[in-house]
Amino acid sequence: MVERDKKIGNEDEYGLLRVAHSPTNHIEGEMLRQKLLAVGIKATLSQTKNGPKIMVFEKDLKIAKATLNS
C-alpha cells in the first residue's frame, strides 16, 4: 500500500466540518485545538488553501468559537 498525497482544499471542501478559527501557524493551531479537546469538543487542525484552520462540527461551532475567544 502506498499512501496518497494529501489534498489541500478550500474551507468548504471538508464535509460536515466548519471553520472555528484561523490560527497564524500550526503551532498556535495545535495549542488551540488542545484547548478545545480539553473541554470536550472534537476539533481538527487542517491546512487549507487559505492557511491553517481549526475545524469543528457545526453543532459545536458556537461553543468552540466562544471557548477560543475566552
Image (cartoon, rainbow, N blue to C red):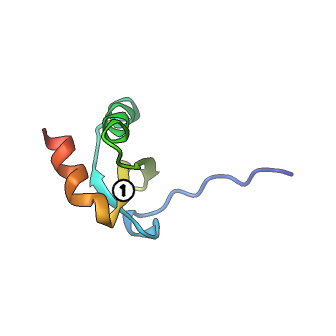
Which residue in the rendered view is the most extreme toward the front? 40
Q: Which residue is drawn at 37% across and 54% down?
A: 55
Residue neighbourhood size for the residue with mark 1, other residues' Cα within 10 Å, grouped as few (<14), some (14–19), many (≥20):
many
* Residue 36 in which image quadrant: top left
The amino acid on which the numbered mark 1 sits, given as a three-letter code, is Val
Q: Total number of numbered labels?
A: 1
Q: Which residue is drawn at 45% across and 49% down?
A: 46
Q: Out of 30 and 23, give the one closest to the viewer.
A: 30
Q: Tell me the quadrant of the picture where the C terminus can be found.
A: top left
Residue identified by numbered label 1 = 56
x%, y% of residue 50?
Answer: 35, 54
x%, y% of residue 53?
Answer: 36, 49
Above or below, 16 relative to 62 = below
Q: Out of 7 and 68, give the one closest to the viewer.
A: 68
Disc 1, SS: strand
Q: Out of 45 and 39, give the one closest to the viewer.
A: 39
* Residue 12 in which image quadrant: bottom left
Which residue in the rendered view is the most extreme toward the right? 1
Q: Which residue is drawn at 34% across and 31% down?
A: 31
Q: In this view, does 30 lie to the left or right of 5?
A: left
x%, y% of residue 15?
Answer: 46, 70
